[in-house]
Amino acid sequence: SPLVPLDLFFIPCKCWKIEAFLAFPSVNRFCTAFNNRTGFLCDDSVTCILASQVCDRVSNCRKGEDEQKKLCGDLPNSLPGYLVFRCSNPSYWIYADQRCNRMNDCGDCSDEMGSFAACPPCGLEWWSCSPVLYEYCSCIPRRLCRDGIQHCLSWSDEYIC
């Protein structure tokens, strides 16, 4: 059989976008901000802002990359997943740095309690109890102890704390 030149079998690849993506992967902007909170890394690769500072209508990064329309156009869907915490009520979400901050940001305590939140126990500056105020979930600040006002269902903040 006659030999066929190999270049006749060459099928041009239209995968330059894939090659470009592999050669220049998208920037990983995950970082850890102060107090071990989830953050967003600015273009300078040094500045790490809190997740909740992204799309807050204030340019916290020098070049304003934290307020770009591509990032903020369809909240929370346009945000990278690591910046978002979904509350147990699927209609609600908060920024990831607001999870486990001892405040009831979801309104149902799903950001402070349960397996999805995975929060550590109350720290030294907090008292563990069932709060009467909707603002807290499972801990109250110790500064509220023995102030003459009931903050825990058991009154432990006034008699034991």
Image: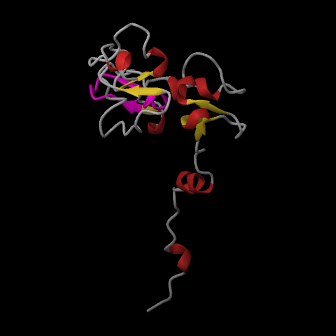
Q: Is residue 22 left or right of residue 116?
A: right
What range of the chain is rendered magenta?
Answer: 85-101
- x and y percent of residue 61 in the render? 68, 27
- Residue at position x 54%, y 81% from top? 5
Q: Is residue 78 left or right of residue 136?
A: right
User: Residue 52 colored magenta?
Assistant: no
Q: Nearer the viewer, residue 30 or 13?
A: 30
Quarter-of-image position of residue 68: top right
Q: Is residue 91 magenta?
A: yes
Q: Is residue 81 left or right of residue 87?
A: right
Q: Position of residue 145 (x, y in %)?
A: 43, 17
Residue drawn at (43%, 30%) of the image:
99
In this orientation, which residue lies closer to the viewer: 29 or 18? 29
User: Which is more toward the observer, 35 or 98?
Assistant: 35
Which residue is located at x 73 percent, y 37 percent?
A: 44
**Which corner quadrant holds the C terminus?**
top left
| Residue 98 horizontal/vertical position (percent) | 46, 27
Residue, x 31% and y 29% (percent of image)? 110
Quarter holding residue 22: bottom right
**Which residue of the protein is positioned furthest toward the front in this rendering?**
159
Q: Residue 55 at what x, y percent from top left? A: 54, 22
Q: Is residue 71 above or below residue 16?
A: above
Q: Quadrant of the N terminus?
A: bottom left
Q: How is the image coloured?
A: secondary structure
Marker count (numbered): 0
